[in-house]
């Protein structure tokens, strides 16, 4: 009997010792402990040393205040054009109010994941397949907005939501690859045609400039030749006029008429000598050289004798 009583007292002592050590709490940085006294919320223990009342105080929840990344499992969503895609992501959250995170919801992590999935499905349902790949920021912003509204009650803050993958079915992926290849081929054909167009334009402009330059050169050549001929004709006319004036001056001097006749006779005989082997028609009285010379009226007196 005595042994039994001693054993009971020993157990009670051990329980007291355990409860005493449990009443001493060392809380680390970025951690919050929720204390209940007699089953009712009493206070929140911050970082540091704390002593509790044994049997009356109890640490019910221990909350980590650091930012946490939570995976959102893949889920099937239907786009606005009725294409099924698989979407997954990551939520980055942290606890702002440990009391609300402990008593406001049973499991804020699970609730945040579920709310992120439902919001993602609703947003993707308003977008076509092509836009879902372009509007990731819109989807993320909408999920963060909804989670922040709920986080006021849950005592959490959603920093960001990132979509990791948007995976359409294999048939859709094959069709998208064909579409991308067709678009690339279209761009290649368009680039080739544009290059050929520019090449043709450049060649035609070059040919046009060449023809213009040639015509301008031909025009300038003809102008220069015409001006040269005009100068030549003018020079010849000027020289001829001067020669006539000089001849008339010489003829009007004493003995000038006889000298002129002698020079003409000499020219006449020279020309006849050069026509020795030529077939030409001459007057019948070619031998009457004196009569020919008399017909040349070099002055008024000779003209009157010829008459």
Image: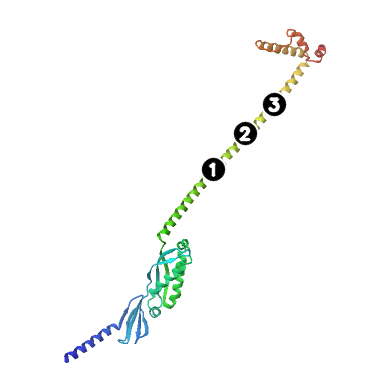
- Residue pointed to by mark 1: 200
| Mark with earlier residue (2, 1) | 1
Q: Is residue 275 above or below residue 188?
A: above
Between 278 and 172, the one lying in front of the other is: 172
Disc 2 crowd, CA 10 A, few/some/many (<14, 14-19, 20+)? few
Query: In the rendered view of the protein, which quadrant contains the N terminus?
Result: bottom left
Mark 3 to mark 1: distance in Å? 49 Å
| Mark with earlier residue (3, 1) | 1
The reply, left or right, for residue 232 in relation to residue 184 is right
- Residue pointed to by mark 2: 218
Write the residue at 42% across / 68% down: 161
> Residue placed farthest to the top in the image?
287
- Determine which quarter of the picture holds residue 110: bottom left
The reply, left or right, for residue 240 in relation to residue 74 is right
Disc 1 crowd, CA 10 A, few/some/many (<14, 14-19, 20+)? few
Q: Is residue 264 above or below residue 203?
A: above
Between 136 and 12, the one lying in front of the other is: 136
Question: Of circles 2 and 1, which is in front?
Answer: 1
Q: Are marks 2 and 1 in contact (CB under 8 Å)?
A: no
Between 122 and 275, the one lying in front of the other is: 122
- Residue pointed to by mark 3: 233
Disc 3 crowd, CA 10 A, few/some/many (<14, 14-19, 20+)? few
Between 234 and 135, the one lying in front of the other is: 135
Mark 2 to mark 1: distance in Å? 27 Å
The reply, left or right, for residue 265 in relation to residue 24 is right
């Amino acid at each position: 009997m005595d042994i039994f009583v001693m054993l009971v007292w020993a157990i009670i002592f051990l329980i007291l010792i355990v409860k005493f050590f449990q009443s001493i709490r060392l809380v680390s940085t970025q951690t919050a402990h929720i204390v209940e006294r007699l089953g009712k919320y009493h206070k929140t223990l911050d970082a540091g040393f704390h002593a509790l009342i044994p049997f009356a105080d109890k640490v019910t929840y221990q909350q980590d205040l650091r930012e946490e990344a939570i995976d959102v499992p893949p889920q099937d969503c239907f786009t606005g054009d009725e294409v099924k895609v698989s979407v997954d992501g990551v939520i980055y959250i942290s606890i702002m109010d440990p009391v609300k995170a402990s008593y406001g919801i049973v499991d804020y992590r699970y609730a945040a994941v579920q709310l992120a999935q439902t919001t993602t499905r609703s947003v993707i349902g308003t977008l076509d397949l092509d836009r879902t790949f372009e509007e990731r920021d819109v989807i993320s912003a909408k999920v963060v907005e909804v989670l922040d509204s709920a986080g006021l009650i849950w005592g959490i803050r959603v920093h960001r939501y990132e979509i990791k993958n948007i995976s359409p079915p294999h048939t859709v992926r094959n069709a998208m690859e064909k579409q991308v290849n067709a678009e690339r081929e279209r761009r290649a054909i368009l680039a080739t045609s544009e290059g050929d167009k520019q090449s043709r334009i450049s060649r035609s402009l070059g040919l046009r400039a060449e023809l213009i330059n040639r015509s301008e050169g031909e025009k300038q050549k003809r102008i220069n030749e015409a001006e040269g001929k005009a100068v030549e004709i003018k020079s010849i006319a000027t020289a001829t006029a001067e020669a006539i004036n000089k001849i008339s001056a010489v003829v009007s001097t004493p003995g000038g008429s006889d000298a002129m006749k002698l020079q003409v006779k000499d020219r006449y005989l020279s020309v006849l000598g050069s026509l020795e082997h030529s077939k030409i028609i001459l007057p019948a009285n070619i031998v009457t050289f004196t009569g020919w010379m008399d017909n040349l009226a070099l002055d008024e007196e000779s003209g009157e004798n010829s008459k």
